[in-house]
Image (cartoon, grey):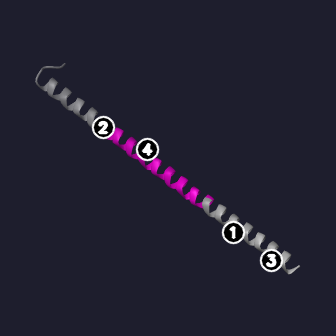
Amino acid sequence: MASKGLQDLKKQVEGAAQEAVTSAGTAAQQVVDQATEAGQKAMDQVAKTTQETIDKTANQASETFSGFGKKFGLLK
């Protein structure tokens, strides 16, 4: 009888340990997923900001060259 009780206890402990491992694995995966998502959002923001800066610089250059062209009579 005592042996049966120990076997049951062992199974319960093993089950609890497996659940803990599974939960820890799930939590770790969630952390990785959140970090990946945050990294992707950061890269998207960098790309957006870089594109906006390129666009502004191109517009400023265009306006500057247009101004030079008008100043020197090359553009009307």
The C terminus lies in quadrant: top left
Q: Nearer the viewer, residue 68 or 6?
A: 6
From the image, tell me which residue sits under label 3.
6
User: Which of the two labelled residues, at mark 1 and mark 3, occupies the earlier sequence position?
Assistant: 3
Measuring from the top left, give residue 10's x and y in whole percent.
76, 73
User: Which of the two labelled residues, at mark 2 and mark 4, occupies the earlier sequence position?
Assistant: 4
Badge 4 local density, few (<14 within 10 Å), some, or many (20+)? few
Circle 1: element type: helix
Circle 4: element type: helix
Q: Nearer the viewer, mark 2 or mark 4?
A: 4
Please report the bounds of the magenta region as a residue range: 26-53
Is 54 left or right of 3, judged from the image as shown?
A: left
- Which quadrant of the structure image shows residue 25? bottom right
Report the amino acid beneath label 4: Asp
Report the amino acid beneath label 3: Leu
Q: Nearer the viewer, residue 10 or 28?
A: 10
From the image, tell me which residue sits under label 2.
54
Report the amino acid beneath label 2: Ile
Query: Residue placed at 66% from the left, 61% from the top?
Result: 22
Badge 3 local density, few (<14 within 10 Å), some, or many (20+)? few
Q: Are marks 3 and 2 in contact (CB under 8 Å)?
A: no
